[in-house]
Amino acid sequence: MLDAFLMMLHGMSPYLLLGFLIAGVLHAFVPASIYSRYLSGTGWRSVGTAALFGIPLPLCSCGVLPTAVSLRRSGASRAASTSFLIATPQTGVDSIAATYSMMGLPFAILRPVAALVTALAGGMAVGALERRGSLPDVQQDANYEFSTVKPGFWPKVVETMRYGFFEMMQNIGRWLVLGLVIATLITVLVPDDFFQTYARYPFLNMLVILAIAVPMYVCATGSIPIAAALMMKGLSPGCALVLLMAGPAANLASVLVISQAFGRKATVAYLASIIVGAMGFGLLVDYWPGMRDMFVNAMPMQHHAMHHAMNVSWLNWLCSGLLLIFLAVAMGAKYWKSYQLRKNNKTMEKKEFKVKGMMCNHCKAAVEKGLASLDGVTAVTVDLAQGIAYVEGNVTDEAVRAKVTELGYENA
């Protein structure tokens, strides 16, 4: 089991570190205003631009929600916002690099292409509804804004490192580790011929994968080791692609928020483009002559047994060590801050509200800003690790709970 875990870690770590670095550069050096400047139309240009903007961004399906609603409030059309919603969580610079390391070049190319096609389809469908005036006005705002970065080259370099190797580690670290652990368990415990028994039913396998992937939460990077491990047990590459597309792009929380913010018709277009797109690309990979074999043979993990230790270079060990150190520091700081918040807020007797559905720092920022906007609230702090919002001021419990629901999260 340790050999299997280390093999996947060594294969992913250099590409993950590169991806986190590029993500930090995008965050610090690309002006936030550019994302809304070109997204006001409902046609191909705005929808395509929104998808191309979203593909490299390392935002998960929950973190992209307040960002998309903020884009909408900044002047982006619902068509462009929907395209951004579909494209962004399916992939990112970090997950593209990690996909190449574990699943090969064909998967690394097809993932962003599939994200682009599904985003265009969903965005244009919403654009058609928008032009006909059949969509309701946006009712909610997640109250999230892009982070501001101090001017100057070196402050941006510092922000690049902070965001890429600290904040992003906090956002997806738990899901990345969970994905690696699940993949390790699949590798060791699932028989090698498990999926080969059902290999002649790829369409049925895809439906099962969809039924599991759509409701659950899994980030674009965390889904990679799971899909790779399942392929090693006989799952077809088309079914693995369905998991990689549908798992990160949708979950129950995101569907509820999109329904509230964009309307039911836009939500149907959003889900349909993801489901139909994932099934379509999955069937293409499995049934197009020669394509299935190309995807299987190009998979790096396919060329050596999972249960044997992999001969790795010092660079792999160095990258794996750095990745684990960054993860330990980021997650340790996250839970230490959680402990300090609980300790301090108990002595100050602030009201505690349990909030379900917060997955990352973007969610935390949305809840903090949303609750701070309520009349009578003087201070808000959110413990992301425990899912608790501490509210200070003269405000009713009902008003706080109503605001939490309006933001798209659940009261526990």
Image: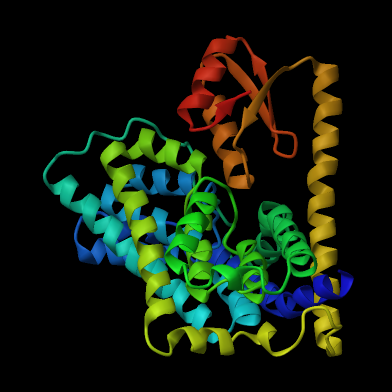
User: Of 226 and 267, which appears nearest the observer?
Assistant: 226
Numbered disc total:
0
User: Of 29 and 180, which appears nearest the observer?
Assistant: 180
Q: Is residue 358 above or below residue 402?
A: below
User: Of 306 and 379, which appears nearest the observer?
Assistant: 306
Q: Position of residue 89 (x, y in %)?
A: 50, 58
The image quadrant where one finds the C terminus is top right
The image quadrant where one finds the N terminus is bottom right
Q: Position of residue 59 (x, y in %)?
A: 54, 57
Q: Is residue 280 above or below residue 32?
A: below
User: Of 391 and 15, which appears nearest the observer?
Assistant: 15
Q: Taking the image as drawn, is residue 22 in sight? A: no
Q: In the figure, residue 41 lies in which quadrant?
A: bottom left
Q: Residue at x 47, y 50 (%)?
A: 250
Q: Residue at x 47, y 81 (%)?
A: 109
Q: Residue at x 29, y 44 (%)?
A: 266
Question: Which colour style is shown?
Answer: rainbow
Q: Is residue 79 left or right of residue 197?
A: left
Q: Is residue 134 left or right of residue 262?
A: left
Q: Position of residue 135 (x, y in %)?
A: 21, 38
Q: Is residue 332 above or below residue 367?
A: below
Q: Is residue 314 left or right of residue 355?
A: right
Q: Taking the image as drawn, is residue 349 in sight? A: yes
Q: In the figure, residue 152 lies in which quadrant?
A: bottom right
Q: Position of residue 31 (x, y in %)?
A: 46, 62
